[in-house]
Amino acid sequence: MIEAHLRKLRARDDVSQEEERAILAMISDVREFPADRVVVRRRQDLKESLLLLDGWAARTKDLRDGGRQISELAFSGDFTDMHGFTMKRLDHNITAITRCRFAVAPHDRVLDTLTRHPHLMRLYWLMTNIDGSIHREWTVSLGRRSALSRMAHLFCEILERLKVAGLTDGNSYDFPLTQQELGECIGLTSVHVNRTLQALRRQGLIQVENRRATILDLESLQSVGEFDPDYLILEKRPR
Amino acid sequence: MIEAHLRKLRARDDVSQEEERAILAMISDVREFPADRVVVRRRQDLKESLLLLDGWAARTKDLRDGGRQISELAFSGDFTDMHGFTMKRLDHNITAITRCRFAVAPHDRVLDTLTRHPHLMRLYWLMTNIDGSIHREWTVSLGRRSALSRMAHLFCEILERLKVAGLTDGNSYDFPLTQQELGECIGLTSVHVNRTLQALRRQGLIQVENRRATILDLESLQSVGEFDPDYLILEKRPR
DNA sequence: CGCGGTGTTGAGACCTGTCAAGACGTGTGG
DNA sequence: CCACACGTCTTGACAGGTCTCAACACCGCG
């Protein structure tokens, strides 16, 4: 049930059998949400954190003019709002992109478990820091890169992150985002997403059809996106 | 010496006298850097974290084309690379904007102190989560807001953050960024920064001269920037 | 079969970038 | 004390990337 989650943790540090049991024991429940549903609403008081078991979710913020910005994507195995454990309220919504299943971890159990296992506390702290790292990379994309480069970068990031969770098939993966949602990630309108996608396709870098993405020329795609997986902290070390 | 730092912590939760002593005891040393110097270099192995005592610093990333993006500003009282405690290497540089003084906290001491004080560990975890929250807000700015709105938002954020640290004089504060650096924060060229700054000035919202910023009409500035301080988590609660 | 969401295409507008030149100001060396 | 150099700020003209608006195609689903 939480294999993908454990793979992500173990890509960064060892997790003992006892710690694994402790993690599992934090979970009280499993909850399901349909696509496009707000899972956790901004400002709402939190008493639990959610571990995404299945599907894609996103951190979203709505704007005055009706627009929306996605600040990070979440996949199976991601603790989507572990930061809510310390913040007690989120600054953004968590929205289900596809149908999603979440494991529920009540904060009293999290507190108890992490206090008794300081190493796990540091590991989860690390995982939220990696979210920060991803945010910084998106900042660079949005601030300084062209539409083509931003899009290439995002497809590289998704590939790398899904690989760690064991959710890729070679250089190909399920890709449920609409062009509208893709635009909400990289700060473009859906019209321009469509044209930029065609440009990547025309250059033989990537193909997206039937809700599936296939990277045809990874090296060139990484070069266009100026992608360096460094920021994903894929290195096993004592934390 | 670390008053500004304690003010920031205490804006979010109580910090006991004993915890305060423990924080102070983490510091081994004070180090100084001239303006424009890289303080911590990306990928460098870290054995300590730095608490900014004095000056402005920034998280920066360099790009292939020679450009640079700033992903967050740091002021007196900010632990600029507490996330390095779990990451062991940073994904970005920390650059001194002005001359800076840092308190040094070796990681072995941090580990020892935070293990003995789980509440402090959660508090510092919270502080890095707030950095993440700020990143997300910048993502929204860069992805969806106009140049004018982004700039207005940034000036509001700086005011709010400096207020918490006790570094403002009414709605006015020292502002050492060049227009070039300001552009590196909000994804604009220095030429366009200059014109946008003039637009804010012309509308009577803000004045920037002699390395000092004065907000003339805070309410309008917040409205133009669509600013809501919510994301700074300025709420005292048990964490 | 019709409908709503999604994807595609074209034309024109607009915001921001690029390039270039000059003004201003401050620190340094003669 | 002056001359100069360098970084920063300012302004103008023009280019170009992305947005807006609009229309239509496609498709899965009720």
Image: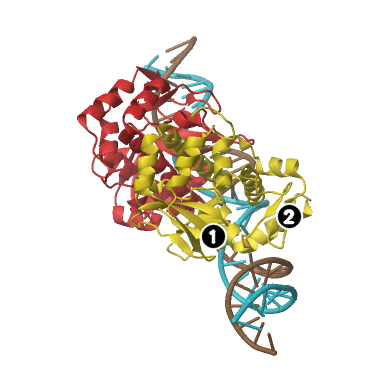
Chain colours: A yellow, B red, C brown, D cyan
Q: Is residue A82 left or right of residue A234?
A: left
From the viewer's perspective, is residue A166 above or below residue A13?
below
Q: Quadrant of the N terminus of chain B?
A: top left
Residue positioned 31% across, 36% down in the render: B119
Q: Is residue B77 left or right of residue B37?
A: left
Residue tagged 1: A100
Question: Which of B89 and A8 lies nearest the eye of the viewer?
Answer: A8
- Identify which amino acid the numbered label 1 is placed on: Cys
Chain of the residue where label 2 is placed in the rendered structure? A
Neighbor class of circle 1 (other Cα within 10 Å; few <14, some 14-19, many 20+) is many
**Residue contact at pointers 1 and 2, CB within 8 angstroms:** no
- Identify which amino acid the numbered label 2 is placed on: Ala
Residue positioned 39% across, 19% down in the render: B32
Picture disc at residue A199: 2
Mark 1 or 2, nearer chain start: 1
Q: Quadrant of residue C12?
A: bottom right
Q: Is residue B185 left or right of residue B231?
A: right
Picture disc at residue A82: none
Residue A128 at least partly seen: no
Question: Which of B152 and B28 lies nearest the eye of the viewer?
Answer: B28
Q: Secondary structure at mark 2?
A: helix
Q: Position of residue A84 (x, y in %)?
A: 39, 48
Neighbor class of circle 2 (other Cα within 10 Å; few <14, some 14-19, many 20+) is some
Question: Which of A59 and C16 lies nearest the eye of the viewer?
Answer: A59
